[in-house]
Image: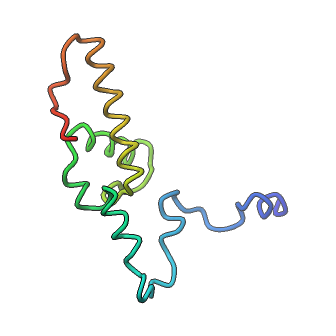
């Protein structure tokens, strides 16, 4: 069984998916904050989380509390784009069933 775990990479600690690569040296030096700056420029980070509409925040709540995907308060630009696609899908489904737009206004 240990051979199978080491082959599949399951021999280490069990961490939530979002925490896999968050630890490290932390002393990035010259290029330490470059990744955060690129992420913010692409539309991610805490600043962009504050600009989400209530439906996007609801999607984050479901992901965090029900699906157990960890904290959703500092998502990457890719994660935020995925959440926006989910909320756009929900808006479309609501409109097709109810015949009118969702009362929560889309900010993007």
Q: What is the quadrant of the C terminus in the image?
A: top left
User: Residue 44 at what x, y percent from top left?
Assistant: 32, 57
Taking depth in this image into account, of 68 and 17 the one nearest to the observer is 17
Residue 26 is left or right of residue 39, and the answer is right
The residue depicted at 37 percent of the width and 34 percent of the height is 86
Q: Quadrant of the N terminus?
A: bottom right
Q: As displayed, is residue 89 above or below residue 15?
A: above
Q: On the picture, is 1 further left or further right than 81?
A: right
Which residue sits at x=48%, y=70%? 22
Residue at 36 percent across and 27 percent down: it is: 89
Residue situated in front as seen by the camera: 84 or 10: 84
Q: Is residue 8 left or right of residue 51?
A: right
**Residue 39 location (% of width, % of height):** 36, 63
Q: From this view, report whether residue 45 is shown above or below residue 104.
A: below
Q: How many marks?
A: 0
Q: How is the image coloured?
A: rainbow
Q: Quadrant of residue 59?
A: top left
**In the rendered image, the vertical position of residue 77 relative to residue 59, given as above or below:** below
The quarter of the displayed image where residue 100 is located = top left
Q: Position of residue 75 (x, y in %)?
A: 36, 56
Residue 84 appears at what percent x and percent y? Answer: 33, 40
**Which residue occupies 75% across, 57% down?**
8
Asked whether, in this view, residue 98 is left or right of residue 60, the answer is left
């Amino acid at each position: 069984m240990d051979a199978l775990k080491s082959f599949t990479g399951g021999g280490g600690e069990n961490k939530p998916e979002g925490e896999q690569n968050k630890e490290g040296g932390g002393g990035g030096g010259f290029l330490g904050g470059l990744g955060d700056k690129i992420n913010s420029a692409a539309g991610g980070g805490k600043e962009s989380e504050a600009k989400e509409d209530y439906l996007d925040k609801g999607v984050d709540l479901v992901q965090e509390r029900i699906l157990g995907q960890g904290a959703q308060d500092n998502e990457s630009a890719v994660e935020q784009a995925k959440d926006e696609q989910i909320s756009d899908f929900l808006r479309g489904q609501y409109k097709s069933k109810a015949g009118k737009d969702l009362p929560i206004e889309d900010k993007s």
